[in-house]
Image (cartoon, grey):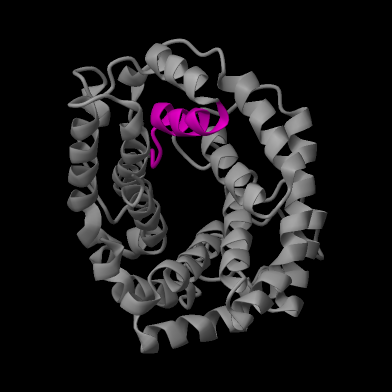
């Protein structure tokens, strides 16, 4: 699917990263001398695309398109993507980002952390065969190392998980963090993520899916948690966990999780989250389908296609409140569709 849209998605990602305003900085002013809140000064690598985390994961989208879909992206779009990434992902720019996150260790926790780790891992993967991407990876390495320390420190001090369907969702963060740091060779971070996942979610009972979705969710708490746990647990444990927490998924229960969310105002930033919910559900349902028997597995894949098809036009043709971030979630959904 992404192959058909690669050029358009790459062009859109560049456009929104290059759009400086509107901007939601998330900057905590620490005193009267800390009032020069301008995008390029605070975040020379990650300004644009409305907010820091969206800029990070839209750059991840460009790296992912270059890695997975270079032919479909086309020479012109690939060259333009490379130029933007080379302009942003420099040692000098990343040094400013590292200093900012060192001084403000709670900034963008955990969602932005997870996406920054994913960007570093994606650049590292592409950089294994691409000299230019290796320079991006080298520039990102200090940020990935700093965030690894933040993750380890934070997980020791967090007693309970956040389970709602927005940025603070800990299952989503752990899923992305453990994947990124596994690929980056940080087994200590992976172990910490696994321990947190088991401690927070390992003994869960039936998921209260009747409470989903919330009015501004872009994640399904139950499905996101399930994706994490089938990664963390061994096969036998994962099957038992799914049978207990999401029994008969795709076989007549939890059907509302398979339905396309209603979006009444896609120009509203919170309402547009529900477009992302459709894509993250598609990602989750495709990931979980192999854990179900036919015909439930087929039903999950069918529902995933329906969710994806319902919102694809918004990815590039929607309001900026949707276009500044949806490419990334479309790529997550597409990546899951490539699995056996």
Note whether residue 42 is visible. no
On screen, residue 252 versus residue 160, left or right, reads left
Q: Could you tell me residue 139's position as x and y percent?
A: 72, 72
Q: Could you tell me residue 286's position as x and y percent?
A: 32, 40
Q: Is residue 86 above or below residue 96?
A: below
Between 172 and 297, the residue placed more toward the observer is: 297
Between 60 and 190, the residue placed more toward the observer is: 190
Q: Residue at x 35, y 28 (%)?
A: 291
Which region of the structure is painted magenta? 217-233
Between 329 and 120, the residue placed more toward the observer is: 120
Q: Could you tell me residue 43's position as x and y percent?
A: 66, 69
On screen, residue 231 versus residue 207, left or right, reads right
Q: Could you tell me residue 269's position as x and y percent?
A: 37, 52
Q: Quadrant of residue 234?
A: top right
Q: Is residue 50 magenta?
A: no
Q: Residue at x 34, y 70 (%)?
A: 9
Q: Is residue 143 above or below residue 157?
A: below
Q: Quadrant of residue 314?
A: bottom left
């Amino acid at each position: 699917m992404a192959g058909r849209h690669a050029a358009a998605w790459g062009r859109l990602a560049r456009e929104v990263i290059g759009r400086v305003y509107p901007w939601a900085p998330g900057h905590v002013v620490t005193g009267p001398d800390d009032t020069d809140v301008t995008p390029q000064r605070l975040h020379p690598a990650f300004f644009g695309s409305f907010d820091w985390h969206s800029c990070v994961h839209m750059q991840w989208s460009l790296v992912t398109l270059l890695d997975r879909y270079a032919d479909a992206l086309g020479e012109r779009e690939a060259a333009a993507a490379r130029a933007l990434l080379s302009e942003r992902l420099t040692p000098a720019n990343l040094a400013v980002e590292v200093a900012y996150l060192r001084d403000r260790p709670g900034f963008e926790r955990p969602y932005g952390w997870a996406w920054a780790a994913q960007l570093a891992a994606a650049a590292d993967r592409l950089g294994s065969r691409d000299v230019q991407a290796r320079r991006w990876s080298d520039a990102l390495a200090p940020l990935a190392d700093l965030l690894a320390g933040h993750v380890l420190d934070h997980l020791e001090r967090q007693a309970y998980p956040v389970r709602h369907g927005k940025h603070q969702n800990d299952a989503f963060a752990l899923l992305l963090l453990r994947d990124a740091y596994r690929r980056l060779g940080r087994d200590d971070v992976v172990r910490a993520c696994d321990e947190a996942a088991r401690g927070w979610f390992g003994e869960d009972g039936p998921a209260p899916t009747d409470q989903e979705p919330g009015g501004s969710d872009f994640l399904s708490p139950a499905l996101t948690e399930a994706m994490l746990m089938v990664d963390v647990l061994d096969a036998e444990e994962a099957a038992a966990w799914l049978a207990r927490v999401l029994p008969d998924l795709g076989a007549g229960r939890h059907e509302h999780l398979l339905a396309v969310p209603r979006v009444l105002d896609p120009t509203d930033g919170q309402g547009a989250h529900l477009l992302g919910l459709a894509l993250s559900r598609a990602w989750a349902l495709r990931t979980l389908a192999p854990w179900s028997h036919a015909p439930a597995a087929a039903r999950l894949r069918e529902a995933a296609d329906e969710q994806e098809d319902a919102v694809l036009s918004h990815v590039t043709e929607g309001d900026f409140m949707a276009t500044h971030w949806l490419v990334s979630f479309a790529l997550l959904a597409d990546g899951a569709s490539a699995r056996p």
